[in-house]
Amino acid sequence: MITEQEVIEWSGQTQNVQPFALIIPAVNRYVDNLPSIDRLADGSWAGNTRLGAILLATRWYARKDSASGTYGSADGTVFISKYDSDIARLLNIDGHSKPMVG
């Protein structure tokens, strides 16, 4: 599972980090319940799964103020995608799921 501190360090956020207190447990639960994430022999998450979870948490943080998927800044409007194929690959979801039997 990922920690709030890991995500804060990865994202570079120093202010307004309170939303991570809600985001991190939700991401941990979501990722841990995925059927085909990569795990180590002891059941803990493999490195690619941890990275995918961190990236997912930072994406959810970025989308907190942009339910429509757009964010206005001094440079104009930025689109924040709901889907990221890199995260999907790391977490083995969507079109990147591992084949499963049964």
Image (cartoon, rainbow, N blue to C red):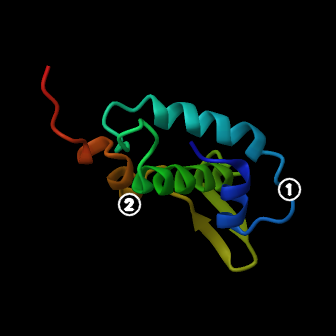
Question: Can you tell which quarter of the image residue 13 is in?
Answer: bottom right
Q: Residue at x 35, y 40 (%)?
A: 41
Q: Secondary structure at mark 1?
A: loop
Tell me the CA gap for discs 2 and 1: 26 Å
Q: Which residue is mark 1?
A: 16
- The circle on residue 86 is 2
Q: Secondary structure at mark 2?
A: helix
Q: In the image, is 79 to the left or to the right of 92?
A: right
Q: In the image, is 11 to the left or to the right of 69?
A: right
What percent of the width, then of the height, locates residue 90? 37, 54
Q: Badge 2: how crowded within 10 Å, few (<14), some, or many (20+)? A: few
Going by the picture, which residue comes out furthest to the left? Answer: 101
What percent of the width, then of the height, locates residue 56? 53, 51
Quadrant of the rendering where the N terminus is positioned: top right
- Depth check, front residue: 38 or 83: 38
Quadrant of the rendering where the C terminus is positioned: top left
What percent of the width, then of the height, locates residue 46? 41, 50
Contact? badges 2 and 1 (CB < 8 Å) = no
Going by the picture, which residue comes out furthest to the front? Answer: 42
